[in-house]
Image (tube, rainbow, N blue to C red):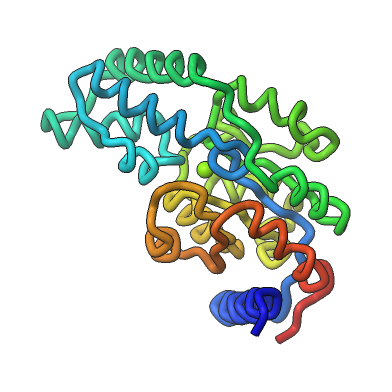
Amino acid sequence: MNENSRVETEWKRAVGRWLRIHEEERMDVQLAMFDMDGVLFDSMKNHAKSWHETMAHFGLTLPVEEAYLHEGRTGAGTINIVSLRERGHEATQQEINDIYAYKSQMFNAMPTAEPMRGAYELLQQVKADGITPMVVTGSGQKTLLERLAKNFPGIFSPSLMVTAFDVKHGKPDPEPYLMGLHKMFGNAAGLSKHRAIVVENAPLGIEAAVAAGVFTIAVNTGPLPDQVLLDAGADLLFPSMQALCDAWTHLAPNFTTSLLL
Ligand code: MG
C-alpha cells in the first residue's frame, strides 16, 4: 500500500470511529480550527525554554520537556502545579503576576518564532476547499497574534478568532473550541460538531477539542512521544504540519463532500 492510500485508509477508519461514537451519519466540514503555538508557529521551543528558565529564576523547577505537557494551560495553572509540587501550596496572586511577567518578557526577547513549515500552504488549501480556517488559542501573546495577519495573509478573519482574551478557562477545558463553534455557527453550534475539525499539537489542547466533541487531528511537532497525543484522544496523528499538508490534497474530497461510511 502506498503512502497516500495508507493515509486515506487511516483517515476513513478514524472518521468511521468518530461517527459511531458521536452517533452522526456524516461529516461535512466547513470549519477548521487551528491551535497557534506549535501548529502555526514554531514557538513551543521558546515557550518551553522561557518557562524552564523563569522557574529556575524564582527557585522552582520545570524541566523543558515537562513544559510541553502543560502547553495550553493558563500561566497561573502551570505556576500553581509547580508551586504545589515543590512548596506544598499554591502561589500568591502577586507571585503569579511576577512569574508570568518575567516569563512573557523572556519569551518576547527570544528569537522570532518562524511560521511552521507547511502551515501557510495547508491554510491556503483549506480555504480554497471552501472551509473556513479559524485560530483557537489560549495565548494572549500580542506579538504572535499580530503576526498571524502578516505571516498568513488573506487567511483569517479577525472576527473569527478565539484567544486568551475571549475565554475564562484554558485548555483542557473545552470552552475555547466550543466558543469557536459558536462564533462560526451561532445557535446551531451544538448541532454542528460534524461540520468542524481541530488541528492541535498539545495533549491538553487535544483533550479540550475532544471534550468539545470535534474530530481532532494531532500534529506531533514537539518532543513528546506520539502515544501521549493519542492517549489524549486524537482521532488522527501526523508527524508534522508538512505531512498533514501533503496528505490534505488527497483527503480534500472527503472533507468537502459528505462522508457516509
Ligand atoms: Mg499548541
Query: Total number of numbered labels?
Result: 0
* Residue at the left extreme, as displayed: 88
Q: Residue at x 88, y 53 (%)?
A: 128
Position of residue 92 relative to residue 179, above or below, is above
Q: Nearer the viewer, residue 24 or 63?
A: 63
Depth check: give the residue in front, 186 or 143. 143
Residue at 38% from the left image edge and 29% from the top image edge: 49
Quadrant that contains the N terminus: bottom right
Residue at x 59% of width, y 76% of height: 14
Q: Is residue 7 above or below residue 207?
A: below
**Residue 253: where, in percent of width, then height?**
82, 71
Q: Is residue 46 visible?
A: yes
Report which quarter residue 160 is drawn in.
top right
* Frontmost residue, 47 versus 114: 114
Q: Where is residue 218 shown, x and y percent of the image?
A: 54, 58
Image coords of residue 156 (percent x, y): 78, 38
Q: Residue, x 43% and y 53% (percent of image)?
A: 203
Say if 228 sits above or below 169 in the image: below
Please indicate whether residue 83 sits to the left or right of residue 87 in the image: right
Q: Is residue 244 left or right of residue 208?
A: right
